[in-house]
Image (spheres, rainbow, N blue to C red):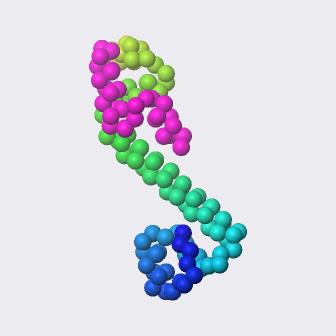
Amino acid sequence: IFLTAHADLDMAISVFTKGAFHLLKKPVDPLTLLQTIEEATAKDKNARSESRYSNFDNRWNLLSQRERQVIELAMQGLMNYQIAERLNLSERTIESHRFNAYKKLGISAIEDIRRLRND
């Protein structure tokens, strides 16, 4: 949001091509300024949310089928040894799949996935 006392067409074109949300000419009505700030904040929040979903979906698609399977079981609350028993694998193998999945997803705990999906 740009505030200026001397707006002209060249300035307007310049600030909008550089990513400005709005250009307001001084003196600015306080209510107009507040409304513009709220609109800009809402737009930014929506853009970040969409980006977060897109980034998560892209990272999720990087997981192997087995890594997805392990993560989905972990999200159900199963411990590594329980996942290993269910999939007939060693607990060490499950730990390895889980570690690789966390790395690809850019997370450090299973709760991070829940938070990303709920944002």
Quarter of the view holding residue 109: top left
Query: What's the residue at 47%, 27% (across, down)?
Result: 75
Depth order, front residue of 83/30: 30
Residue 64 lies, with reference to residue 6, above or below; the image says above
Residue 65 shows up from this direction:
no
Q: Total marks drawn?
A: 0
Would residue 9 be counted in the magenta stretch? no
Question: Which residue is rendered at x = 42% and y = 49% of the image?
Answer: 54
**What segment is highlighted magenta in the picture?**
90-119
Q: Residue at x 31, y 40 (%)?
A: 62
User: Going 33% across and 20% down the picture, which residue do you hit?
Assistant: 94
Residue 36 at x, y percent in the picture: 62, 67
Position of the N terminus by quadrant? bottom right
Task: State whether residue 58 appears in this view.
Answer: yes
| Nearer to the camera, 88 or 79 | 79
Tell me residue 45's x, y (percent): 54, 54
Q: Is residue 10 above or below residue 47?
A: below
Quadrant in the rendering for residue 28: bottom right
Q: Position of residue 43 (x, y in %)?
A: 55, 60
Depth order, front residue of 36/70: 36
Left or right position of 60 against 5: left
Residue 18 position in % (x across, y down): 42, 71
Relative horizontal placement of residue 37, taking residue 116 as reference (left or right): right
Judge from the rendering whether residue 97 lies leftward or rightward of residue 9; answer left or right.
left
Q: Main secondary structure of the magenta part?
A: helix
Which quarter of the figure has residue 95? top left
